[in-house]
Image (tube, rainbow, N blue to C red):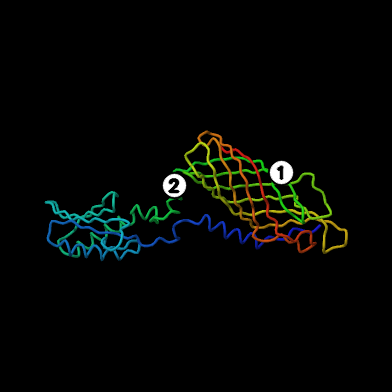
Amino acid sequence: MSPARAPTSSFAAVLVLLLGLVAPTRGWAQAATTTCVTVATDRGDAEGLLRLVRSELDRHSSHRSVDPAREACATHLRIEIIDVREGRFLTARMSESVPHRERIEGNDARALEAALERALVIVLHNDPRRLVGPERDHWLARQGTALRRRGQTLLGAELAQTTAYVDGRFDFLPGVALVARREVDDWHLGVRLSAAWDPGAGVADHARLTLTAGGAVEVEHFFDGLADTSLFAGGGVGLDVQRFTGPTRYLEPGDTGAATEVVVALAGRIGIELFRTADARVRLFGQVALPVMPSSDDDAGVVDAWVPTATLGAGVVY
Protein backbone atom coordinates (compact mmCIF):
# COMPACT_ATOMS: atom_id res chain seq x y z
CA MET A 1 0.00 0.00 0.00
CA SER A 2 1.16 3.54 -0.65
CA PRO A 3 1.56 5.94 2.30
CA ALA A 4 -0.53 9.08 2.48
CA ARG A 5 1.24 12.09 0.98
CA ALA A 6 1.99 14.98 3.32
CA PRO A 7 -0.73 17.57 2.58
CA THR A 8 1.49 20.57 3.24
CA SER A 9 0.30 22.67 0.32
CA SER A 10 -3.35 21.79 0.98
CA PHE A 11 -3.18 22.83 4.62
CA ALA A 12 -1.44 26.08 3.69
CA ALA A 13 -4.09 26.91 1.12
CA VAL A 14 -7.03 26.25 3.39
CA LEU A 15 -5.36 28.19 6.21
CA VAL A 16 -5.23 31.26 3.99
CA LEU A 17 -8.89 30.81 3.02
CA LEU A 18 -10.07 30.37 6.59
CA LEU A 19 -8.09 33.38 7.77
CA GLY A 20 -9.83 35.41 5.07
CA LEU A 21 -13.20 34.27 6.40
CA VAL A 22 -12.56 34.97 10.05
CA ALA A 23 -10.47 38.13 9.64
CA PRO A 24 -11.78 41.00 11.78
CA THR A 25 -13.68 43.81 10.17
CA ARG A 26 -11.29 46.30 11.71
CA GLY A 27 -7.62 46.68 10.90
CA TRP A 28 -4.86 45.65 13.28
CA ALA A 29 -4.16 49.29 14.09
CA GLN A 30 -6.94 51.83 14.54
CA ALA A 31 -6.84 54.91 12.39
CA ALA A 32 -7.13 58.33 14.01
CA THR A 33 -10.73 58.97 15.02
CA THR A 34 -12.21 61.99 13.22
CA THR A 35 -13.31 64.47 15.90
CA CYS A 36 -15.47 67.58 15.77
CA VAL A 37 -14.65 70.23 18.39
CA THR A 38 -16.97 72.75 20.04
CA VAL A 39 -16.06 75.25 22.75
CA ALA A 40 -18.11 77.29 25.19
CA THR A 41 -16.84 80.27 27.16
CA ASP A 42 -18.24 83.51 28.59
CA ARG A 43 -15.18 85.40 27.42
CA GLY A 44 -14.85 86.87 23.95
CA ASP A 45 -12.04 84.59 22.77
CA ALA A 46 -14.03 81.55 21.62
CA GLU A 47 -12.33 81.48 18.21
CA GLY A 48 -8.88 81.55 19.78
CA LEU A 49 -9.87 78.85 22.27
CA LEU A 50 -11.19 76.68 19.42
CA ARG A 51 -7.87 76.93 17.57
CA LEU A 52 -5.99 76.09 20.75
CA VAL A 53 -8.12 73.00 21.41
CA ARG A 54 -7.77 71.76 17.83
CA SER A 55 -4.02 72.24 17.94
CA GLU A 56 -3.73 70.34 21.21
CA LEU A 57 -6.05 67.60 19.95
CA ASP A 58 -3.96 67.04 16.82
CA ARG A 59 -0.94 66.31 18.98
CA HIS A 60 -2.60 62.99 19.88
CA SER A 61 -2.23 60.22 17.28
CA SER A 62 -5.52 58.64 18.34
CA HIS A 63 -7.74 61.57 17.24
CA ARG A 64 -7.83 64.10 14.41
CA SER A 65 -9.82 67.34 14.40
CA VAL A 66 -12.01 67.89 11.33
CA ASP A 67 -14.38 70.49 9.96
CA PRO A 68 -17.91 69.00 10.09
CA ALA A 69 -18.81 70.87 6.89
CA ARG A 70 -16.14 68.93 4.98
CA GLU A 71 -15.79 65.57 6.71
CA ALA A 72 -17.94 63.30 8.85
CA CYS A 73 -17.23 63.19 12.58
CA ALA A 74 -16.88 59.84 14.33
CA THR A 75 -16.91 61.50 17.75
CA HIS A 76 -17.36 64.95 19.33
CA LEU A 77 -15.24 66.84 21.84
CA ARG A 78 -16.76 69.69 23.86
CA ILE A 79 -14.61 72.05 25.91
CA GLU A 80 -16.20 74.51 28.33
CA ILE A 81 -14.52 77.12 30.53
CA ILE A 82 -16.46 78.16 33.61
CA ASP A 83 -15.59 81.20 35.73
CA VAL A 84 -17.00 81.13 39.26
CA ARG A 85 -16.11 82.89 42.49
CA GLU A 86 -13.97 79.94 43.59
CA GLY A 87 -11.85 79.96 40.42
CA ARG A 88 -11.72 78.94 36.77
CA PHE A 89 -12.47 75.40 35.60
CA LEU A 90 -12.12 73.60 32.28
CA THR A 91 -14.57 70.81 31.49
CA ALA A 92 -13.92 68.31 28.68
CA ARG A 93 -16.36 65.72 27.36
CA MET A 94 -16.23 63.15 24.52
CA SER A 95 -19.68 62.60 22.98
CA GLU A 96 -21.93 61.13 25.69
CA SER A 97 -19.17 60.03 28.09
CA VAL A 98 -18.82 61.35 31.64
CA PRO A 99 -17.22 64.84 31.58
CA HIS A 100 -13.85 65.50 33.18
CA ARG A 101 -13.09 68.77 34.99
CA GLU A 102 -9.72 70.43 35.61
CA ARG A 103 -9.00 73.52 37.68
CA ILE A 104 -7.08 76.23 35.81
CA GLU A 105 -4.29 77.17 38.23
CA GLY A 106 -3.68 80.76 37.17
CA ASN A 107 -4.87 83.42 34.79
CA ASP A 108 -2.23 83.21 32.07
CA ALA A 109 -2.18 81.21 28.82
CA ARG A 110 0.27 78.67 30.20
CA ALA A 111 -2.13 77.67 32.97
CA LEU A 112 -4.94 77.22 30.44
CA GLU A 113 -2.74 75.08 28.20
CA ALA A 114 -1.69 72.90 31.13
CA ALA A 115 -5.29 72.29 32.21
CA LEU A 116 -6.34 71.55 28.62
CA GLU A 117 -3.46 69.11 28.17
CA ARG A 118 -4.33 67.21 31.34
CA ALA A 119 -8.02 67.05 30.43
CA LEU A 120 -7.43 65.79 26.88
CA VAL A 121 -5.07 63.03 28.02
CA ILE A 122 -7.86 61.64 30.21
CA VAL A 123 -10.93 62.06 27.98
CA LEU A 124 -9.22 60.93 24.77
CA HIS A 125 -7.84 57.84 26.46
CA ASN A 126 -11.34 56.95 27.68
CA ASP A 127 -13.19 57.81 24.47
CA PRO A 128 -15.84 55.05 24.04
CA ARG A 129 -15.25 55.04 20.29
CA ARG A 130 -11.62 54.11 20.83
CA LEU A 131 -12.30 51.56 23.54
CA VAL A 132 -14.47 49.47 21.22
CA GLY A 133 -12.73 50.57 18.04
CA PRO A 134 -14.19 52.93 15.43
CA GLU A 135 -16.62 50.69 13.59
CA ARG A 136 -16.61 51.01 9.84
CA ASP A 137 -20.08 51.54 8.48
CA HIS A 138 -20.22 48.78 5.89
CA TRP A 139 -22.36 45.67 5.44
CA LEU A 140 -19.82 43.18 6.73
CA ALA A 141 -19.22 45.14 9.94
CA ARG A 142 -22.95 45.51 10.59
CA GLN A 143 -23.58 41.80 10.04
CA GLY A 144 -20.66 40.84 12.27
CA THR A 145 -22.00 43.05 15.07
CA ALA A 146 -25.49 41.58 14.70
CA LEU A 147 -24.08 38.06 14.75
CA ARG A 148 -22.26 38.69 18.03
CA ARG A 149 -25.01 40.59 19.81
CA ARG A 150 -28.24 39.00 18.56
CA GLY A 151 -27.13 35.69 17.11
CA GLN A 152 -28.57 32.35 18.18
CA THR A 153 -26.33 29.29 18.46
CA LEU A 154 -27.75 26.02 17.08
CA LEU A 155 -26.34 22.49 17.11
CA GLY A 156 -27.41 19.59 14.97
CA ALA A 157 -26.72 16.33 13.15
CA GLU A 158 -27.36 15.05 9.63
CA LEU A 159 -27.64 11.77 7.75
CA ALA A 160 -26.64 11.81 4.09
CA GLN A 161 -25.85 9.79 0.99
CA THR A 162 -22.76 10.88 -0.94
CA THR A 163 -22.03 9.97 -4.56
CA ALA A 164 -18.76 10.26 -6.49
CA TYR A 165 -17.84 9.41 -10.07
CA VAL A 166 -14.48 7.60 -10.11
CA ASP A 167 -12.82 5.66 -12.92
CA GLY A 168 -16.00 5.57 -15.02
CA ARG A 169 -18.29 4.33 -12.23
CA PHE A 170 -20.41 5.80 -9.43
CA ASP A 171 -19.56 5.10 -5.79
CA PHE A 172 -22.21 5.50 -3.08
CA LEU A 173 -21.23 6.25 0.51
CA PRO A 174 -23.64 6.75 3.44
CA GLY A 175 -22.48 9.28 6.02
CA VAL A 176 -23.14 11.54 8.98
CA ALA A 177 -22.32 15.12 9.92
CA LEU A 178 -22.23 17.30 13.02
CA VAL A 179 -23.00 21.00 12.61
CA ALA A 180 -22.76 24.11 14.76
CA ARG A 181 -24.01 27.46 13.53
CA ARG A 182 -24.58 31.02 14.68
CA GLU A 183 -27.76 32.45 13.15
CA VAL A 184 -29.12 35.97 12.96
CA ASP A 185 -32.03 37.28 10.88
CA ASP A 186 -31.98 35.48 7.52
CA TRP A 187 -28.47 34.01 7.45
CA HIS A 188 -26.00 32.00 9.50
CA LEU A 189 -22.30 31.21 9.81
CA GLY A 190 -21.54 27.59 10.64
CA VAL A 191 -18.95 24.85 11.02
CA ARG A 192 -19.52 21.32 9.70
CA LEU A 193 -17.68 18.06 10.44
CA SER A 194 -18.72 15.24 8.10
CA ALA A 195 -17.75 11.72 7.11
CA ALA A 196 -19.07 9.23 4.55
CA TRP A 197 -17.75 5.73 3.94
CA ASP A 198 -18.58 2.40 2.33
CA PRO A 199 -18.38 -0.18 5.15
CA GLY A 200 -18.39 -3.11 2.73
CA ALA A 201 -15.96 -1.75 0.21
CA GLY A 202 -13.19 -4.07 -0.94
CA VAL A 203 -10.42 -3.75 -3.47
CA ALA A 204 -11.93 -3.94 -6.97
CA ASP A 205 -10.49 -4.00 -10.48
CA HIS A 206 -10.98 -0.22 -10.69
CA ALA A 207 -10.35 2.79 -8.47
CA ARG A 208 -13.04 3.37 -5.84
CA LEU A 209 -13.71 6.13 -3.33
CA THR A 210 -14.21 4.35 0.00
CA LEU A 211 -14.04 7.30 2.45
CA THR A 212 -14.48 11.04 2.40
CA ALA A 213 -14.31 13.11 5.58
CA GLY A 214 -13.50 16.65 6.53
CA GLY A 215 -14.48 19.97 8.04
CA ALA A 216 -15.70 23.21 6.53
CA VAL A 217 -16.81 26.72 7.35
CA GLU A 218 -20.06 27.66 5.63
CA VAL A 219 -22.48 30.55 5.16
CA GLU A 220 -26.17 30.08 4.32
CA HIS A 221 -28.95 32.51 3.47
CA PHE A 222 -32.66 31.90 4.12
CA PHE A 223 -35.01 33.37 1.55
CA ASP A 224 -37.64 34.09 4.21
CA GLY A 225 -35.97 34.32 7.59
CA LEU A 226 -39.24 34.96 9.48
CA ALA A 227 -41.29 32.11 7.99
CA ASP A 228 -41.86 28.73 9.61
CA THR A 229 -40.60 27.09 6.38
CA SER A 230 -37.92 28.63 4.21
CA LEU A 231 -35.71 27.70 1.29
CA PHE A 232 -32.00 28.32 1.80
CA ALA A 233 -28.80 28.42 -0.23
CA GLY A 234 -25.18 28.81 0.72
CA GLY A 235 -21.64 27.66 0.34
CA GLY A 236 -18.48 26.84 2.25
CA VAL A 237 -14.80 26.01 2.09
CA GLY A 238 -12.85 23.35 3.94
CA LEU A 239 -10.57 20.32 3.87
CA ASP A 240 -11.64 16.92 2.51
CA VAL A 241 -9.78 13.67 3.19
CA GLN A 242 -10.43 11.19 0.35
CA ARG A 243 -9.39 7.54 0.54
CA PHE A 244 -9.25 5.40 -2.61
CA THR A 245 -8.62 1.71 -3.22
CA GLY A 246 -7.88 -0.02 -6.50
CA PRO A 247 -5.19 -1.35 -8.81
CA THR A 248 -1.75 0.28 -8.73
CA ARG A 249 -0.42 1.57 -12.01
CA TYR A 250 3.17 2.22 -10.93
CA LEU A 251 3.88 -1.09 -9.16
CA GLU A 252 3.79 -4.71 -10.28
CA PRO A 253 0.92 -5.72 -12.59
CA GLY A 254 -2.03 -7.01 -10.60
CA ASP A 255 -1.04 -5.25 -7.38
CA THR A 256 -3.71 -3.33 -5.50
CA GLY A 257 -3.43 -0.67 -2.84
CA ALA A 258 -4.92 2.35 -1.16
CA ALA A 259 -4.19 6.05 -1.28
CA THR A 260 -5.29 8.88 0.98
CA GLU A 261 -5.45 12.39 -0.42
CA VAL A 262 -6.19 15.70 1.33
CA VAL A 263 -7.71 18.42 -0.84
CA VAL A 264 -9.28 21.84 -0.40
CA ALA A 265 -12.92 21.78 -1.48
CA LEU A 266 -15.54 24.42 -2.22
CA ALA A 267 -19.15 23.44 -1.55
CA GLY A 268 -22.53 24.74 -2.67
CA ARG A 269 -25.73 23.79 -0.86
CA ILE A 270 -29.46 24.32 -1.38
CA GLY A 271 -32.41 23.00 0.60
CA ILE A 272 -35.46 23.68 2.71
CA GLU A 273 -35.75 24.07 6.48
CA LEU A 274 -38.98 23.24 8.31
CA PHE A 275 -40.31 24.24 11.75
CA ARG A 276 -38.03 27.27 12.01
CA THR A 277 -40.21 28.76 14.75
CA ALA A 278 -39.92 25.58 16.88
CA ASP A 279 -37.09 24.47 19.13
CA ALA A 280 -36.07 21.64 16.79
CA ARG A 281 -35.84 22.30 13.06
CA VAL A 282 -35.77 19.76 10.24
CA ARG A 283 -33.87 20.36 7.01
CA LEU A 284 -33.58 18.61 3.65
CA PHE A 285 -30.68 19.54 1.41
CA GLY A 286 -28.55 18.81 -1.60
CA GLN A 287 -24.86 19.68 -1.85
CA VAL A 288 -22.06 19.59 -4.42
CA ALA A 289 -18.43 19.70 -3.27
CA LEU A 290 -15.77 20.66 -5.80
CA PRO A 291 -12.09 20.03 -4.95
CA VAL A 292 -9.79 22.81 -6.13
CA MET A 293 -7.19 20.22 -7.16
CA PRO A 294 -7.19 16.62 -8.43
CA SER A 295 -6.50 13.61 -6.22
CA SER A 296 -3.22 12.18 -7.44
CA ASP A 297 -1.33 9.22 -5.95
CA ASP A 298 2.24 9.75 -7.13
CA ASP A 299 3.61 6.69 -5.29
CA ALA A 300 1.48 3.83 -6.58
CA GLY A 301 -0.92 5.40 -9.06
CA VAL A 302 -4.12 4.20 -7.42
CA VAL A 303 -5.90 7.38 -8.47
CA ASP A 304 -5.20 10.38 -10.66
CA ALA A 305 -8.50 12.23 -11.13
CA TRP A 306 -10.54 15.23 -10.12
CA VAL A 307 -13.27 13.79 -7.85
CA PRO A 308 -16.22 16.05 -6.99
CA THR A 309 -18.97 14.68 -4.77
CA ALA A 310 -22.76 15.14 -4.63
CA THR A 311 -24.74 14.67 -1.43
CA LEU A 312 -28.41 14.37 -0.53
CA GLY A 313 -29.37 14.41 3.14
CA ALA A 314 -31.62 15.35 6.00
CA GLY A 315 -30.89 16.67 9.45
CA VAL A 316 -32.14 18.34 12.59
CA VAL A 317 -30.82 21.37 14.45
CA TYR A 318 -31.93 22.76 17.81
Q: Quadrant of the C terminus?
A: top right
Instruction: State the residue position of label 1.
Output: 174
In the rendered structure, the answer to whether residue 262 lies left or right of residue 269 reads right
Amino acid on which the number 2 mark rests in the picture: Ala
Picture disc at residue 146: 2
Residue 71 image offset from top left, x and y in percent = 30, 62
Q: Which residue lies at the image location 50% right of the left edge and 57% below the top edge?
A: 23
In the rendered structure, the answer to whether residue 84 lies left or right of residue 132 reads left
Comparing labels 1 and 2, the label whose residue is closer to the camera: 1
Q: Nearer the viewer, residue 10 or 41?
A: 10
Verify CB contact (< 8 Å) between mark 1 and mark 2.
Answer: no
Q: Sort mark 1 into few (<14), some (14-19) or many (20+) by Cα contacts within 10 Å.
A: some
Give the spatial CA distance, label 1 vs label 2.
37 Å
Tell me where residue 305 sits by quadrant. bottom right
Q: Which residue lies at the image location 43% right of the left edge and 61% below the top edge?
A: 29
Picture disc at residue 207: none
Q: Nearer the viewer, residue 208 or 10?
A: 208
Q: Secondary structure at mark 2?
A: helix
Residue 154 image offset from top left, x and y in percent = 54, 40
Mark with earlier residue (1, 2): 2
Amino acid on which the number 1 mark rests in the picture: Pro
Q: Secondary structure at mark 1?
A: strand
Q: Which residue lies at the image location 71% right of the left edge and 54% below the top edge?
A: 242
Tell me where residue 121 sits by quadrant. bottom left
Q: Sort mark 2 into few (<14), some (14-19) or many (20+) by Cα contacts within 10 Å.
A: some
Residue 308 image offset from top left, x and y in percent = 68, 55
Total numbered labels? 2
Residue 236 image offset from top left, x and y in percent = 58, 52
Looking at the image, the residue that sits furthest to the top is 278
Q: Quadrant of the N terminus?
A: bottom right
Q: Which residue lies at the image location 82% right of the left edge and 62% below the top edge?
A: 249
